[in-house]
Image (spheres, helix red, strand yellow):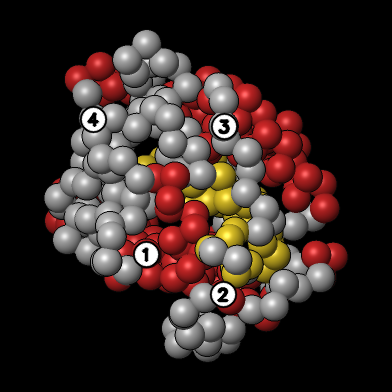
Amino acid sequence: MSLIGSKILTFGGVPQPKLESCRAAIIPAPLEVTVTYGEGAALGPLAIMSASANMELYDEVLDCSPIDQGVYTHGRVNTSGPVAESLERIQAAVAAELTAGRLPVLLGGEHTVTVGALRAMVERYGTGFTVLSLDAHLDMREDYEGERLSHATVMRRALEMGLGVRWAGARSCSLEEIQFLRQQGIEPLWAHQIHADPDWVERALEGLSGPVYLSLDIDGLDSGIMPATGTPEPGGLSWQQANAWLTAVCARHQVLGLDLVELAPLAGQTAWDFTAARLLYRALGLIFRGTL
């Protein structure tokens, strides 16, 4: 479990439920190795858990308390040593939850943790699902500073696994990335297009079928409401836009797993930790509602 001092933290601050009765399990993975600008992503999981313990657990939009469905909190994945070894441990942790029939909820750490989760997903389900990425960045580089396993290469690795990828909130990439995507016949829906199109949610999900994996990089939100991340970008999604997207996704598609990554807490500014915790809780509630 996540610890702060000598206190054990569970998601929502509730007593740890019986694992066998839970529908979802939190897997903290405080990996921070390949970040290239602001630091602090390793502190993200603990900050989210701490903030969640101070949330009201009744969700006024969903008119229920999603925590009642059972959310277990696992101990932190060991993310010391080489990134490849950390990803193997993350893959094993996610695979165990899939085998048990629970929704794996991975908390990063840097976005690289998603690679471990996707490997477990492909091992379990094959490639018949799509990765939906809330992210300011495309993360489609072949390598970054010589590293193929990096926060900047996550979705390139997903494509190499044979998975489809779609973005919400993207507004930053390299020339190399956009040229590669166009060669592949892939055109992202950019954040500036979202802001100009009242029907953007329909456009974002047009032609999408089958189950999905949700990867929520907190920098997909506009930096005005989420500055606590290593690479904050202006022009991102509002709270309302992110929720509209999540609501549509969870109503129409089975969600096989999800992660929330890249929160880099700012000392003395807990509002951003709370925003991340609430986003995760809303996503869980929407997923639970979609599978009742």
Residue occupying image coordinates x 66% and y 29%: 88
Residue type at the position of mark 1: Asp
Going from N to C along the chain, the mark reached first, 4 or 3, is 3
Which structural element holds mark 1?
A: helix
Residue occupying image coordinates x 28% and y 30%: 36
Residue occupying image coordinates x 29% and y 49%: 229
Badge nearest the viewer, 2 or 4: 2
Residue 65 in the image: state x and y as whole percent.
59, 84
* Residue that badge 4 annotates: 173
Badge nearest the viewer, 4 or 1: 1
Residue 271 in the image: state x and y as whole percent.
30, 70
Quarter of the figure with the C terminus: bottom right
**Label drawn at residue 149:** none
Residue type at the position of mark 2: Gly
Going from N to C along the chain, the mark reached first, 4 or 1, is 4
Residue 244 in the image: state x and y as whole percent.
37, 67
Residue occupying image coordinates x 22% and y 47%: 232
* Residue that badge 1 annotates: 273
Above or below — where is 25 with respect to 285? above
Characterize the local packing of mark 4: few (<14), some (14-19) or many (20 or more) Cα atoms within 10 angstroms: some
Q: Is residue 88 left or right of residue 171?
A: right
Above or below — where is 29 with respect to 122? below
Q: Is residue 83 left or right of residue 23?
A: left
* Residue that badge 3 annotates: 80
Distance of mark 2 from mark 4, alpha carbons? Answer: 35 Å
* Residue that badge 2 annotates: 12
Above or below — where is 1 with respect to 169? below
Residue type at the position of mark 4: Cys
Distance of mark 2 from mark 1, alpha carbons? Answer: 13 Å
